[in-house]
Image (cartoon, rainbow, N blue to C red):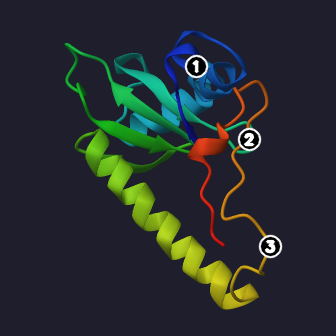
């Protein structure tokens, strides 16, 4: 899942991917049964590879400032963006540990991370981490 940039909030492929569930009546109904009213939220996180999205409560609504993780239905609800972000960081740590346990440590010569998303600007060389 990718946190939206300002341009993603305004449109583009990632924005479109994040809107799919909000346009499907069955997903809107499933969200409502989980306590998330679609009209009170806007998409802040989406993926081009999965259906997972994160919605933030619109200002002036009962959901203001809250974040909900949705994957066809409500997976989890968070009090605010910081709570959501820290939970995702913890989930990434758990997933990384599981991958390391299964496949072992990262082989020498493999970069720490590859930063690439179609349509996004290239990563600056100064911003890349050098593990060697």
Relative horizontal placement of residue 2, taking residue 60 as reference (left or right): right
Q: Nearer the viewer, mark 3 or mark 2?
A: 3
- The residue closer to the viewer here, 34 or 105, is 105
Gap between marks 1 and 2, in whole Å? Answer: 15 Å
Tag of residue 26:
none
Crowding near pointer 3: few (<14 within 10 Å), some, many (20+)? few
Gap between marks 1 and 3, in whole Å? Answer: 33 Å
SS for dot 2 = loop
As displayed, is residue 100 above or below residue 2? below
SS for dot 3 = loop
Q: Residue at x 63, y 69 (%)?
A: 131
Q: Label 1 belongs to which residue?
A: 8
Give the image location of residue 15, x and y in percent.
62, 20
Q: Nearer the viewer, mark 1 or mark 2?
A: 2
Q: Mark 1 or mark 2: which comes first in sequence? A: 1
Contact (Cβ within 8 Å) of mark 1 with mark 3: no
Q: Label 3 belongs to which residue?
A: 109
Q: Mark 3 or mark 2: which comes first in sequence? A: 3
Q: Quadrant of the N terminus?
A: top right
To which quarter of the image does residue 72 belong? top right
Q: Label 2 belongs to which residue?
A: 116
Give the image location of residue 53, x and y in percent.
55, 38
Give the image location of residue 93, x and y in percent.
48, 71
Q: Residue at x 27, y 35 (%)?
A: 66
């Amino acid at each position: 899942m990718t946190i939206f940039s300002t341009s993603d909030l305004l449109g583009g492929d990632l924005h479109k991917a994040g809107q799919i569930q909000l346009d499907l009546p069955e997903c809107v109904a499933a969200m409502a049964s989980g306590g998330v009213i679609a009209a009170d939220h806007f998409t802040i996180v989406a993926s081009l590879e999965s259906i997972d999205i994160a919605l933030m409560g619109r200002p002036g609504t009962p959901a203001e400032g809250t974040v909900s993780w949705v994957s066809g239905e409500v997976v989890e609800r968070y009090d605010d963006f910081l709570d959501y972000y820290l939970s995702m960081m913890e989930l990434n740590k758990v997933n990384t540990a599981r991958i390391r346990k299964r496949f072992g440590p990262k082989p020498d010569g493999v970069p720490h991370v590859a930063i690439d998303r179609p349509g996004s600007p290239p990563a600056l060389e100064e911003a890349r981490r050098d593990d060697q």
